[in-house]
């Protein structure tokens, strides 16, 4: 496989950038002609950059101009690493006797492109490791796949590429590890998993041992289901792993995260304890334990775990949020506000951080500032229940009864039986009627 010469590569970047910049000046975001022009321009890149550019563009979530910038950013990254680095990679790739066009299977081709894409921006030992991964992938995707074991290896490789491409966690989960995947891509992942399940059924009937890497891939599949909001399926994979190996720390932790997410806090706590027994210094396990204890309204037990994490990494955003939540539960609203604001320094538009800031300000009697926090949340998430119900409560305190009712009604459409919102709505209705009489 050949890369274009360095000068040709630079020339194509410049041509691509100039052409698209001319169109950007004439068309607004999401204009169909802009999308068409960018896609047509990428076709004229020499291989493999035509395929890599299309892969980045098609899989980046955002407007056309943002997708274009992602492609350009990647190409500039290669440019910034210099000619020597580029030519070393070119020599390695030329030693591989294959062409992307020879790979007919779409998923296998995407997987191979992803590996090449990673190699081109990697250095040193990381570059060597990624090159070895490419060799392994090529060995699998170009084989005849006569044996059931080969088919499972092939499926495993495609699944690994899929989760890497879509930002799905491959290891320990935290309570905030939810990602957004387009429905068609979600179905692609589910199809790969179903194919794997069928192959494993065949293995059972033929009495062939399960693949050695099965535990690793089952973590990945469990995480895929959790991160695509299918908790039941995620739990079934983690349980299956723990049936085979009760001390698997990833399965223990991730089982706890999913149970915590569905409100089974006591059961989640038992899994976090078991995970911490095997990994007592793991900061993810400690943070998850602190978060779960907060959910059980046991903030005094939560704080020691969170403090241990912050001693190691002082500005870790999820831990700052959890510590602020613990202080809020203890009635220490100034401290809760302090940690909400620290968390917001890292993630300024995060809804959970803004919500913690808002409820802390409200408890300190700073209703107008609290209102601003929830308005920011609702700009990005119009159906955020916490923001809607808190807006209803704040507007009630500010005497704006009509607006309070509007927000309460929106919140009750999401959670019709939420007692706090129902009570606030009744108060607002009563106050509004009194003001009219």
Image (cartoon, rainbow, N blue to C red):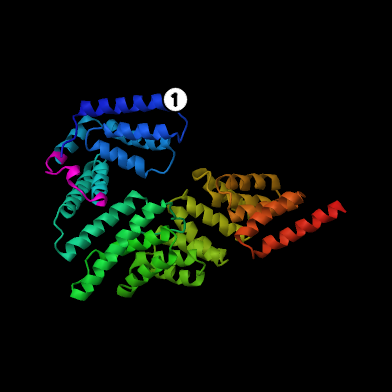
Q: Residue 41, percent across and down?
A: 31, 31
Q: Residue 61, percent across and down?
A: 41, 44
- Identify the secondary structure beneath mark 1: helix
Q: Which residues are magenta?
A: 93-107
Q: Residue 18, percent across and down?
A: 35, 24
Question: Which residue is tagged 1?
Answer: 25
Name the image quarter holding the C terminus: bottom right
Q: Is residue 226 above or below residue 42?
A: below
Residue 276 in view in this figure = no
Q: Residue 381, percent across and down?
A: 56, 49
Q: Is residue 102 left or right of residue 111?
A: left
Residue 123 in view in this figure = yes
Q: Is residue 101 left or right of residue 279?
A: left
Give the total number of marks visible in the rendering. 1
Q: Quadrant of residue 329?
A: bottom right
Is 98 one of the magenta-colored residues? yes
Name the image quarter holding the N terminus: top left
Nearest the viewer among 170 and 102 is 102
Q: Is residue 241 above or below residue 170?
A: below
């Amino acid at each position: 496989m050949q890369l274009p010469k360095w000068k040709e590569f630079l020339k194509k970047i410049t041509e691509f950038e100039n052409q698209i910049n001319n169109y950007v000046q004439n068309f607004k975001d999401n204009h169909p002609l802009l999308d068409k022009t960018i896609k047509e321009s990428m076709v004229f890149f020499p291989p493999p950059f035509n395929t890599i550019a299309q892969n980045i563009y098609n899989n980046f979530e955002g407007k056309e101009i943002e997708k274009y910038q992602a492609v350009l950013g990647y190409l500039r990254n290669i440019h910034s690493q210099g000619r020597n680095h580029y030519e070393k990679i070119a020599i390695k790739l030329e030693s591989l006797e294959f062409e992307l066009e020879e790979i007919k299977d779409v998923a296998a081709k995407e997987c191979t492109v992803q590996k090449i894409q990673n190699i081109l921006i990697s250095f040193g030992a990381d570059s060597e490791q990624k090159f070895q991964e490419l060799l392994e992938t090529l060995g699998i995707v170009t084989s005849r796949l006569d044996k059931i074991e080969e088919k499972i290896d092939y499926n495993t490789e495609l699944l690994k590429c899929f989760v890497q491409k879509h930002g799905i966690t491959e290891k320990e989960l935290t309570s905030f590890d939810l990602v957004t995947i387009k429905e068609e891509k979600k179905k692609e992942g589910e199809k790969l998993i179903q194919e794997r399940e069928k192959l494993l059924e065949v293995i059972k009937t033929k009495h062939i041992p399960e693949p050695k890497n099965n535990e690793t891939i089952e973590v990945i599949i469990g995480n895929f289901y959790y991160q695509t909001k299918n908790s039941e399926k995620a739990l079934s994979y983690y349980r299956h792993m723990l049936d085979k190996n009760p001390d698997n720390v990833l399965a223990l932790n991730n089982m706890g995260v999913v149970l915590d997410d569905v409100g089974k806090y006591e059961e989640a706590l038992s899994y976090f304890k078991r995970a911490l027994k095997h990994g007592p210094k793991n900061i993810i396990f400690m943070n998850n334990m602190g978060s779960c204890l907060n959910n059980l309204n046991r903030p005094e037990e939560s704080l020691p775990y969170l403090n241990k994490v912050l001693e190691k990494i002082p500005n870790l955003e999820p831990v700052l949020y959890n510590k602020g939540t613990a202080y809020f539960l203890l009635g220490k609203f100034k401290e809760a506000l302090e940690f909400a604001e620290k968390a917001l320094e890292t993630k300024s538009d995060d809804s959970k951080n803004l919500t913690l800031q808002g409820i802390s300000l409200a408890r300190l009697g700073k209703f107008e500032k609290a209102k601003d926090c929830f308005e920011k949340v609702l700009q990005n998430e119009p159906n955020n229940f916490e923001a809607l119900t808190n807006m209803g409560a704040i507007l009630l305190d500010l005497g704006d009864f009509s607006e309070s009712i509007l927000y309460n009604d929106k919140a009750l459409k999401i959670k019709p039986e939420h007692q706090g919102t129902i009570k606030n709505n009744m108060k607002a209705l009563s106050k509004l009627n009194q003001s009219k009489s």
